[in-house]
Image: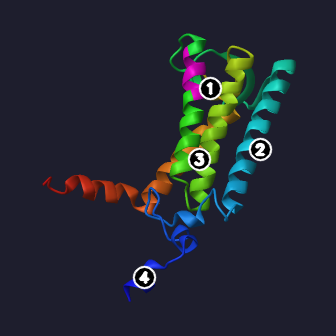
């Protein structure tokens, strides 16, 4: 009886379920034999970066000042030496370093804790591509090109932003929802609420 249990092949052990960050089957995520989610991740990330960079190349060449919705939405060229939405101006090397660290951290996190749902994959792809899009600008130009300006006539002006900022913001909110929907917050709360032995 014992001999039969010990003779389990290594291939069967490798295919056993390994829980990821939210307790899901890692064999269903990427990387692995199920490469569909990895392909989706790459497609979303690459498309966002290409769209972001093409829009900035056009903006840099044309420098438009266009009122899309007069009094509410404008398209105008802005050189942003700060962080997302023009916040926290400091030396460009700081933001380049932070951008590189952020991209690498996301890649490492994805390697060890791959999301097992489409929402998780897309949210990480948006975050990575948003960070990469602005990082490319800072390395290439020394600043980030922003061009979407939302305001309420002259009463309120939201800092100008770009496609990379939008992807990053949407990705963060989608990731929060992904973690909430997976129950990871509840599990963390229950774990922290248990008395220490």
Taking the image as drawn, is residue 117 in sight? yes
Residue 96 occupies quadrant: top right
Residue on which the image places disc 4: 5
User: Which is closer to the viewer, label 2 or label 4?
Assistant: 4
User: Pointer 3 and pointer 2: residues touching (CB < 8 Å)?
Assistant: no
Q: Specify which label sits upstream in the sequence, 2 or 4.
A: 4
Give the CA distance from mark 2 to mark 4. 49 Å
| Quadrant occupied by the C terminus | bottom left
Mark 1 → mark 2, Cα distance in angstroms: 33 Å
Relative to the observer, which residue lies in front, 31 or 142?
31
Q: Quadrant of the N terminus?
A: bottom left
- Residue placed farthest to the bottom in the image? 1
Structural distance between the alpha carbons of marks 1 and 3: 35 Å
Of labels 1 and 4, the one closer to you = 4
Find out whether residue 180 is within the magenta segment: no
Residue 99 within the segment the image draws in magenta = yes
Query: Which of the numbered marks, if any, corresponds to residue 153?
Result: 1
Tell me how far mark 3 sits from mark 4, CA to CA. 40 Å
**Camera-nearest residue between 84 and 38:** 38
Please name the residue shown 44% across and 85% down the image.
4
Residue 189 in percent (x, y) is at 28, 54
Residue 30 image point, x, y percent = 62, 57
Residue located beneath label 2 in the image: 47
Residue 124 image label: 3
Distance (Cα) linking label 3 and label 2: 14 Å
Q: Earlier in the sequence, mark 1 or mark 2?
A: 2
Image point (73%, 15%), residue name: 141
């Amino acid at each position: 009886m014992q001999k039969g249990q010990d003779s389990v092949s290594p291939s069967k052990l490798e295919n056993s379920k390994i829980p990821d960050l939210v307790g899901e089957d890692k064999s269903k995520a990427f990387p692995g034999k199920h490469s569909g989610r990895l392909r989706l991740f790459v497609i979303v990330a690459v498309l966002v970066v290409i769209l972001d960079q093409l829009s900035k190349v056009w903006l840099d060449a044309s420098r438009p000042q266009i009122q899309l919705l007069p009094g509410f939405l404008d398209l105008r060229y802005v050189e942003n030496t700060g962080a997302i939405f023009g916040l926290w101006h400091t030396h460009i090397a700081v933001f380049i370093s932070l951008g590189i660290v952020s991209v690498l951290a996301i890649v490492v996190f994805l390697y060890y804790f791959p999301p097992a749902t489409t929402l998780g994959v897309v949210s990480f792809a948006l975050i990575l591509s948003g960070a990469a899009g602005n990082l490319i600008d800072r390395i290439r130009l020394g600043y980030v090109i922003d061009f979407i300006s939302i305001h309420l006539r002259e009463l309120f002006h939201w800092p100008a932003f770009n496609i990379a900022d939008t992807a990053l913001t949407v990705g963060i909110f989608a990731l929060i929802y992904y973690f909430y929907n997976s129950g990871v917050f509840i599990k963390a709360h229950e774990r922290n609420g248990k008395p220490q032995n």
